[in-house]
């Protein structure tokens, strides 16, 4: 249960940081840099609904779906923010949860797929529980809910397994143990052209990590790539998973907790490219959320730094480091020609993909927004500590 204990500890630390307003200060970048003192425009407030929010929301048709810290699922009208229904989530066996264990909500044409301790499917219109996935092999799959396709739900787990679930009835399609000799966590998987890709961490001495590629239909492993070991003299420094994977053409990109970024060949997992941490100063352990937009890889950091790289050369295009916004904790959102970055300080910043210029930023008075928002056309839906809010973006 080491993976579950580690995940619980991380949630507790993050929650305490958000409540206390504690942030890590961003370091100055060497390239183009925009600051909050330059007074970038603010997005137009469309509506705000009081809610102690949690996690990344989902937008589907005329509705927004969000978790609440009170261990609920809430459906809101996309246009007005009015609450349509709210349902308490069922407790897991032997668990007494004060807030959701997962943070991801996805949706299909008929169901809301919720990552909690287990994976849950709720009726989109009523919130009624349709099915619940609580595997016999492993535990807590909802903590690392990944991609939902038209017929399957893919999720990792702190129990060291990668799962495929039938989206219609919640039954297991297949379950793959990534490591059975050491405690292992498998993180949120993605699907790319029929292949499931997931980062993993093996809790040994030292802790190591990498990426596994699996056939989406059968669950048969194609390849497994470990992050390279540290050079001689580095000691037993951990190289756990810390971001990704994301894909671009034939590349699979992921990050290690050292801050290093690695690109693997999608066909066989061989190492194609590696980069040292983009940080100016050494960071003992980092988390690097990443997104790919067109031919750019954009990478965040606990230090607040955001760096964009040109693909496939990995040449740096720009870097942005805010003066006071704090860490990028949970992820970023790709949005056409920009990237939406939520900071632990409570703001969401929209950065221009081509230049790194700040297109717009929310004000702290709007609410504490540290989770990745959902973008829908010109609208952005953000889940905060006191509300769910809809904005119209500034160009």
Image (cartoon, grey):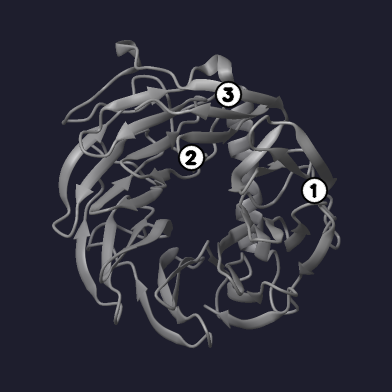
Quarter occupied by the C terminus: top left
Name the residue beneath numbered marker 3. Answer: 46
Which residue occupies 70% across, 79% down? 137
Residue beneath disc 1: 97
Q: Which residue position holds label 2? A: 329
The answer to whether residue 3 is left or right of residue 232 is: right
Residue ID at (57%, 80%) = 177
| Mark 2 residue crowding within 10 angstroms, few (<14) / some (14–19) / many (20+) | many
Q: Quadrant of residue 366?
A: top right
Task: Assess disc 3: are there few (<14), some (14-19) or many (≥20) residues with their C-alpha within 10 Å of its C-alpha.
Answer: some
Residue drawn at (73%, 58%) of the image: 117
Crowding near the residue tagged with mark 1, few <14, some 14–19, many ≥20 C-alpha atoms within 10 Å = some
CB atoms at circles 2 and 3 under 8 Å apart?
no
Quarter in which the N terminus is drawn: bottom right
Q: Is residue 87 above or below residue 275?
A: above
Observer-nearest of 236 and 130: 130
* Residue 49 to residue 2: above or below: above
Q: Quadrant of residue 33?
A: top left
Of mark 1 and mark 3, the one earlier in the sequence is 3
Q: Label 1, label 2: how many angstroms apart (C-alpha)?
A: 22 Å
Q: Disc 1 on helix, strand or loop?
A: loop
Query: Which quarter of the picture shows residue 113?
Result: bottom right
Residue 90, given in percent of the width and then of the height, sits at 85, 55
Instruction: Tell me: residue 222, above or below residue 86.
Output: below
> Marks 1 and 3, how far apart in space?
33 Å
Q: Position of residue 302 (x, y in %)?
A: 41, 38
Instruction: Name the element at disc 3.
Output: strand
Q: Mark 1 or mark 2: which comes first in sequence?
A: 1
- Please, is residue 52 above or below residue 67 in the view? above
Marker disc for residue 259: none
């Amino acid at each position: 249960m080491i993976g579950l204990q580690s995940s619980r500890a991380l949630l507790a630390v993050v929650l305490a940081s958000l409540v206390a307003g504690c942030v890590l200060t961003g370091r100055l970048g060497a390239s183009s840099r925009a600051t909050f003192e330059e007074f970038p425009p603010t997005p137009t407030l469309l509506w705000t609904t009081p809610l102690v929010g949690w996690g990344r929301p989902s937008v589907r048709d005329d509705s927004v779906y969000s978790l609440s810290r009170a261990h609920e699922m809430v459906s809101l009208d996309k246009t007005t923010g009015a609450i349509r229904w709210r349902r308490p989530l069922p407790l897991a066996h032997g668990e007494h949860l004060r807030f959701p264990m997962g943070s991801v909500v996805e949706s299909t044409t008929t169901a809301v797929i919720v990552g909690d301790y287990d994976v849950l499917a709720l009726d989109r219109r009523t919130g009624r529980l349709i099915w619940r996935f609580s595997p016999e092999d492993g535990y807590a799959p909802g903590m690392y809910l990944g991609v939902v396709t038209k017929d399957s739900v893919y999720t990792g787990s702190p129990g060291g397994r990668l799962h495929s679930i039938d989206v219609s009835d919640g039954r297991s399609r297949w379950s793959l143990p990534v490591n059975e000799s050491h405690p292992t966590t498998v993180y949120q998987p993605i699907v790319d052209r029929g292949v499931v890709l997931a980062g993993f961490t093996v809790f040994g001495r030292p802790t190591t990590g990498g990426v596994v590629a699996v056939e989406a239909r059968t669950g048969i492993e194609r390849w497994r790539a470990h992050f390279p070991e540290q050079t001689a003299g580095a000691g037993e420094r951990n190289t756990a998973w810390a971001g990704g994977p994301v894909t671009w053409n034939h590349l699979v990109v992921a990050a290690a907790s050292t801050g290093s970024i690695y690109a693997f060949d999608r066909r066989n997992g061989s190492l194609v490219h590696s980069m040292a941490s983009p940080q100016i100063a050494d960071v003992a352990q980092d988390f690097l959320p990443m997104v790919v937009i067109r031919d750019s890889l954009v990478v965040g950091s606990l230090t607040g730094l955001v760096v964009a790289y040109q693909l496939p050369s990995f040449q740096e295009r720009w870097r942005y480091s805010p003066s006071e916004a704090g860490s990028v904790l949970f992820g970023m959102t790709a949005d056409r020609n920009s990237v939406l970055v939520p900071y632990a300080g409570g703001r969401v910043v929209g950065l221009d993909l081509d230049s790194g210029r700040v297109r717009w930023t929310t004000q702290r008075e709007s609410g504490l927004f540290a989770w990745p928002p959902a973008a829908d056309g010109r609208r952005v839906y953000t889940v905060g500590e006191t509300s769910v809010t809809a904005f119209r973006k500034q160009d």
